[in-house]
Structures are given as structure tokens and as C-alpha cells.
Amino acid sequence: MIIVLVGPPGSGKGTQAKVLCQSLGIPHLSTGDMLRAAKKAGTLEPALVALMDSGGLLPDAVVVGLVGARIAEADCQRGFLLDGFPRTVPQAEGLETVLARRATPLDVVVQLDVPDSLLEERLVHRRADKRTGQIYHLVYNPPPPDADLEHRADDRPEAVRERLAKYASMTAALLPFYEGRGLLRRVDGAGKPEAVLAQVLAVLPKR
Ligand code: AMP
């Protein structure tokens, strides 16, 4: 099963991806995580690090190359879930080319729909435990007292609004691209994680 998961920041993409990948036994490929790891390891060119740090998108060829190399690894042979990629139509086309080469087409693009007002509320109260990566909501899913919390700099209100606007302009072209290919499935992401998961599972192609 090859899945692309699309959703605005705060839509619960990370939470859904984790559970979904566990239950399907496929790896979770997040280009953001891959790039942060490359940056930390010192293998990302300084110019690309600067671009990433300024919140800009990396060149399409760079991310397509990164994903292409990753999905050639053994653990991706039974499928994988992409998160944060593709972000542009050229990336989506690049992915199609890579998948055509291995004769494994994309099965489905799942879009998590959440109203902007709810996204802002979720992100501003979102905290992650630095040691475990576990994500909490200060009101609805409070962290344990011993958690070592961090508030992502880009989860602050001004940055959140900018990220939501960026997401809207990014998906303006990407979602119609996948809709045109009959691959797009929209899921209401406003409910509890379990309810959203049930809907996501319901739109996956039956095997
Ligand atoms: P994320 O964690 O998905 O928000 O990604 C963090 C940063 O990595 C982004 O702000 C971009 O600089 C870069 N990045 C991640 N995925 C992509 C992508 N598909 N295309 C271009 N840049 C990306």
C-alpha cells in the first residue's frame, strides 16, 4: 500500500501516520524528518540548510531524489506512507516517475480536512516531549508532570497563520492534480483521533 497523507499543520497528520503505519506494517516517510536528520548529521548542503531554516521549500529535484533513494530501501518494498511530500505538482510528477520505474503506482491520497479556527487552537496548545517525540495538547491531552516539553517556534500564533496560508497556496494546485487522477479521498479530521482513523481506514483501497 502506497499512501500520501496530506493535511494542514495541526490536522493530526503525524498522529494518524504513526497509527496507520503501525497497523499496516509500512514505514512512515516524512521528508521534514529526513531533512532534519540530514541537517543534524551535517550531510545537507549549507545553502539548503539556510533555505530550510528560513522556512522556504527545498528544490523539487532535491526532495524527489531524497524520497527516490529512501523508497528503494528494503523496508519500503511492501509499501510506505509519505508525509510532507509531495508539496508541489512537479514533486507529484517526480513521484509518479519514480513509482512507474518500480511498477508500483500510488494507491491513495488521503486529505485530512480541518477548519482553520480549530487548527490554530490545536497548534498554539501543542507541545512535544523532547525525549520521546510524543505530542500533547495542553487542554485535551495534557502531558504527564515529568514530560520535558518543547513548543515548536513555528507553533506560535503569527507563524501558525503564515503556515496555514502557505498550506492553502500549496494545495491549491496539488489536490486538483490528484483529484484529476481519481486518487484523492477527503476525510473529516476535526474529530477524536480514533474517529478520524476509522474514516481513514474506510477510504483505503481494499486488498
Ligand atoms: P516539515 O516538517 O514537513 O514542515 O518540513 C520542514 C522543512 O523541510 C520545510 O519547511 C522545508 O524547508 C523542508 N521540506 C520538507 N518537505 C519538503 C518538500 N516536500 N519540498 C520542499 N521542502 C520540504
Image (cartoon, grey):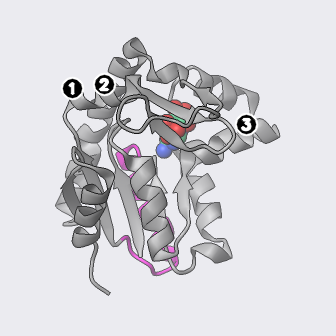
- Where the N terminus falls, by quadrant? bottom left
Label 1: element kind = helix
Residue bearing mark 3: 39
Identify which residue is drawn at 25% across, 42% down.
173
**N-terminal label among 3 and 2:** 3
Residue bearing mark 2: 120
Q: Residue furthest top?
A: 158
Residue 11: in sight, yes or no?
yes
Tell me the kind of residue under disc 2.
Glu
Residue bearing mark 1: 117
Report the number of discs.
Answer: 3
Q: Residue furthest right?
A: 42
**Magenta part of the chain:** 85-106
Label 3: element kind = helix
Locate residue 80, reporting x and y percent. 50, 68
Locate residue 97, reporting x and y percent. 46, 66
**Would you say the residues marked 3 and 2 are in contact, meaning their CB atoms lie under 8 Å apart?**
no
Tell me the kind of residue under disc 3.
Lys
Identify which residue is drawn at 53% across, 60% down.
28
Tell me the kind of residue under disc 1.
Ser
